[in-house]
Image (cartoon, helix red, strand yellow):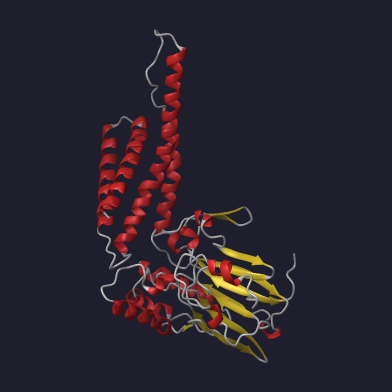
């Protein structure tokens, strides 16, 4: 931990020196420079203090969330400024060398001074991520969006034609700090009037107690025609903190599983249920968490016991890497998989039909929205809550509504 803090301190100091150079080039007003230095020093000190207070037995809490948010708010804009000024320094160095070898002794100059307009450009560019990150921490994290999809399947049973599914994922209740916004999101879920509601994991960050203040709020999710079902995510196993005793971890895990009962959701633990409508039925399958780089408690074979290849299937699997690794080419033909987990990194740019980008795409092939392979689909929900960075920029919290239709997709 000590070496990590030293490393963080050195990085922040170097970036800060460049950022200060930009401010100093733009203005010579002493009071402005002093105010800037004082505010930066206070933020710098709090970040080091916040990281030093992180307790592996407690895990993420309000202080660690704020510390990470402040760290990014300080680092990202100033890092951009540092890169721009470093590029100018490289130019100044080459200009100095060229001048030394090409000019006579009488007109040789020292290293060229920083150009004011370069610092102004650096400051203007840095203002973009600063305001974006600040907005993400104050407004964006609760900027809930309802995203709709219509999917066509030739073998969808007739009586399920038009069935609607509301999916939400990655609640991370331990991060919440605004009851009104969460109540609004629950109202949004209810307003969709779907036939079934599915929650695809990560009800807490670590501890079951995180959900206790929110149980009554989530109990207000109305039970639709086909019910409410849920699965576990990687954070629901309590594996990101240190436990004094194995029994404490086990008790916490059992308490997390019981949270689903308390909010009136049926938790599927490597099992399936048959949804019946008249003479027709479809299979809803729920696996425990299975991720390429995370806990692999999911057992698709066990979860699919009693389900035939020709049955229409909806699979809930928290981590989309499961679909990539095992599900999409499986001989059992899983028609639709619903996942979450990635949060879209809570940072990116999405303009429908124009651009869809997030750094998380370099880690996860399927990271947000709908993907298809040979008539089999996965939908990756962008997440309901937030984790680590206490905000969202460009990748907004999502409530998904999917309508199933019988027939061929029209191009």
Specify the quadrant that holds the C terminus: bottom right
Where's residue 239, x and y in %?
A: 36, 70
Residue 142, compared with residue 403, is above or below; it is above
Residue 9, compared with residue 214, is above or below; it is above
Residue 311, compared with residue 40, is above or below; it is below
Specify the quadrant that holds the N terminus: bottom left
Tell me the residue at 74%/75% (across/down): 407
| Residue 334 in sight here | yes
**Front-most of residues 398 and 317:** 317
Where's residue 284, x and y in %?
A: 57, 82
356 lies left or right of 35 = right
**Quarter of the rendering containing residue 316:** bottom right
Tell me the residue at 38%/21% (across/down): 111
- How many dots with numbers? 0
**Front-most of residues 264 and 293:** 293
Where's residue 346, x and y in %?
A: 46, 59
| Residue 171 in sight here | no
Tell me the residue at 45%/67% (across/down): 294
**Quarter of the rendering containing residue 353:** bottom right
268 lies left or right of 277 = left
**Front-most of residues 86 and 363:** 363
Tell me the residue at 42%/25% (across/down): 93
Where's residue 227, x and y in %?
A: 53, 85
328 lies left or right of 47 = right
């Amino acid at each position: 931990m000590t070496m990590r803090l030293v490393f963080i301190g050195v990085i922040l100091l170097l970036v800060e020196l460049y950022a200060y150079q930009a401010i100093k080039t733009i203005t010579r007003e002493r009071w402005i420079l002093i105010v800037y230095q004082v505010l930066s020093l206070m933020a710098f000190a709090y970040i080091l203090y916040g990281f030093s207070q992180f307790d592996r037995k407690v895990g993420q809490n309000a202080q660690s969330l704020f510390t990470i948010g402040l760290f990014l708010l300080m680092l990202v804009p100033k890092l951009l400024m540092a890169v721009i000024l470093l590029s100018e320094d490289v130019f100044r160095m080459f200009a100095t060398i060229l001048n030394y070898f090409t000019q006579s002794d009488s007109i040789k100059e020292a290293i060229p001074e920083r150009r004011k307009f370069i610092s102004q450009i650096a400051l203007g560019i840095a203002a973009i991520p600063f305001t974006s990150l600040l907005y993400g921490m104050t407004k964006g994290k609760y900027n809930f969006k309802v995203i709709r999809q219509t999917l066509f399947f030739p073998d969808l049973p007739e009586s399920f034609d038009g069935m609607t599914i509301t999916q939400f994922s990655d609640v991370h209740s331990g991060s919440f700090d605004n009851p009104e916004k969460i109540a609004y999101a629950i109202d949004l879920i209810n307003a969709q009037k779907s036939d079934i509601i599915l929650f695809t994991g990560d009800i807490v960050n670590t501890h079951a107690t995180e959900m206790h203040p929110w149980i009554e709020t989530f109990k207000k999710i109305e039970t639709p025609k086909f019910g409410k079902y849920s699965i576990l995510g990687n954070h629901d196993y309590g594996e990101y903190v240190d436990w004094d005793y194995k029994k404490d971890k086990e008790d916490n895990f059992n308490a997390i599983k019981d949270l689903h009962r308390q909010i009136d959701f049926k938790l599927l633990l490597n099992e399936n249920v048959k949804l019946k409508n008249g003479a027709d039925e479809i299979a809803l399958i729920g696996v425990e968490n299975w991720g390429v780089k995370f806990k692999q408690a999911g057992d698709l074979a066990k979860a699919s016991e009693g389900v035939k290849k020709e049955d229409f299937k909806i699979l809930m699997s928290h981590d989309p890497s499961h679909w990539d690794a095992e599900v999409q080419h499986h001989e059992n033909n899983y028609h639709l998989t619903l996942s979450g987990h990635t949060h879209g990194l809570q940072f990116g740019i999405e303009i429908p039909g124009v651009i869809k980008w997030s750094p998380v795409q370099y880690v996860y092939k399927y990271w947000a929205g709908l993907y298809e392979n040979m008539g089999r689909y996965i939908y990756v929900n962008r997440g309901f809550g937030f984790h680590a960075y206490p905000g969202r920029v460009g990748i907004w919290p999502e409530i998904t509504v999917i309508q199933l239709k019988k027939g061929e997709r029209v191009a």
